[in-house]
Image: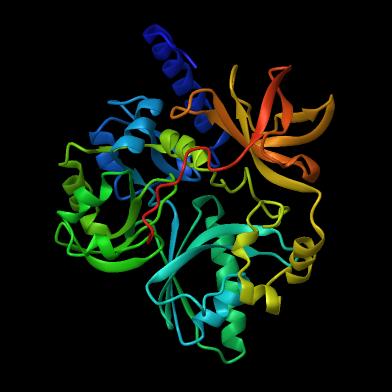
Amino acid sequence: MCSLNIGKVFCAIQSNRVVLSRILQVRLYSDASNAKKTLLYDLHQKYGGKIVDFAGFLLPVQYSDLSVSASHLFTRNSASIFDVSHMLQTNVTGKDCVAWLESICPLDLQGLPNGSGSLSVFLNNKGGIIDDLIVNKVSDEQLYIVSNAGRLDVDKQHMIDTSAAFRKAGKDVTVQFWDVSERALIAVQGPKVASVLQELTDIPLQDLMFMTSRVGTVAGVQCRVTRCGYTGEDGVEISIPADKANIVTEALLKSEHVKLAGLGARDSLRLEAGLCLYGNDIDESITPVEANLTWLISKRRRGEGTFPGGDIILRQIKEGVDRRRVGIRIETGAPARKDAVLKCDGEIVGKVTSGCPSPSLGGNVAMGYVAEKLKKAGTSLCVNVRGKDIPCTVAKMPFVPSKYYVKK
């Protein structure tokens, strides 16, 4: 960590370059000529957003007023708005919608109170993760689901096929996907979110706990507000009708405590929070047990085992696995990139799946998979960066303590 002011400036510049490099070189999934604009595209340009093609959508990687690392720190200390309209928003209705979702997810949706939600995963028949998603149980006959843009086509087809099979069996379930042109989705994250948002909404935020959702007005516009996010901070995601997206976002930006933030800060924030990125840290070859996400398999569902790959996952819970996702702390040197090799006593024992500089902590953070016997926090390893083996340590996650708004 740099101690002199000039050192801090240099570190910030280097950190910014590294994060931008990861976003621009590693995270682009499609040809920009086919990329879609979100409803906030013009607003991003108005505020100096540096636009890139991310998962087939034109989104800002950062803005002209702040570097990536400065935007990251602003979020941790105040509040930032992220355009996450590229994520797939799905509305599911019907008296059998709960049973349908439980047939493709290991979530105990029956046991969730109305108005609450949870992280979950779509699973394949081998227990591999098709995608991770947030499920909100609006009622026994309505669900609101948000899943990843990078898996948009896969998720759509999976939900279409499985719901069609349900209907063929005489069940009542209807799946409706909102196109990016129909609804915007913004994530407002940081410790000052509640105080800023409460002045604009009729929803009593003191009653809106982490992973609960409610419909109300924000800046006079009827929206769905869900207390969740991808940064480890307190915050909300706001689903907004198409023609009112700019009105709500601009109303929030009137506060001196709120700024726009892009993909660069979102990636480093989620990694400090120990949260997975689909395609890097989890995919169809990795089970929740290997990914250190066993808590997603609820008690009732473990007892039933009636979810895709249930026999494999339950066996792994009982007998263990060969590899496990862990946090990795690298105090000095360059950050470890995706696929960087991890070693113990000169032998390859795993690889990095995500890594970046840590603006909050200094040094670098990463996550990856190591042999099960090496998963304990404090275990000393080496990571190969640019051809050189650099000391690193297995670390507990999250790297930065979470500040979710929960009952105490």
182 displayed left or right of 230: left
Q: Can residue 336 be seen in this view?
A: yes
* Residue 391 against residue 191 in the figure, above or below: above
Q: Residue 50: x and y, percent?
A: 36, 30
- Give the total number of marks visible in the rendering: 0
Where does residue 363 sit, x and y in percent of width and height?
53, 23
Residue name at image x 67 percent, y 38 percent: 377
Looking at the image, residue 280 lies above or below residue 290: above
Which corner quadrant of the image does residue 342 belong to? top right
Q: Quadrant of residue 370?
A: top right
Q: In the rendered view, tell whether residue 163 sits above or below residue 369.
A: below
Colour scheme employed for the rendering of this structure: rainbow
Is 72 positioned to the left or the right of 295 in the image?
A: left
Identify the residue at the far bottom of this view. Answer: 170
Q: In this view, does 237 lie to the left or right of 126?
A: left
Is residue 50 shown to the viewer in this render? no
Residue drawn at the location 26% of the way across and 41% of the way down? 42
Q: Which of 23 and 352 is in front in this view?
A: 352
State the image coordinates of residue 62 (x, y, percent, origin top left).
37, 31
Is 42 drawn above or below residue 185 in the view shown?
A: above
Quadrant housing the C terminus: bottom left
Residue at image coords 58%, 66%: 157
Tell me: 197 left or right of 27: left
Residue at point 45%, 38% (across, down): 269
Where, by quadrant of the figure, is residue 386 drawn?
top right
Residue 350 x %, y %: 76, 36
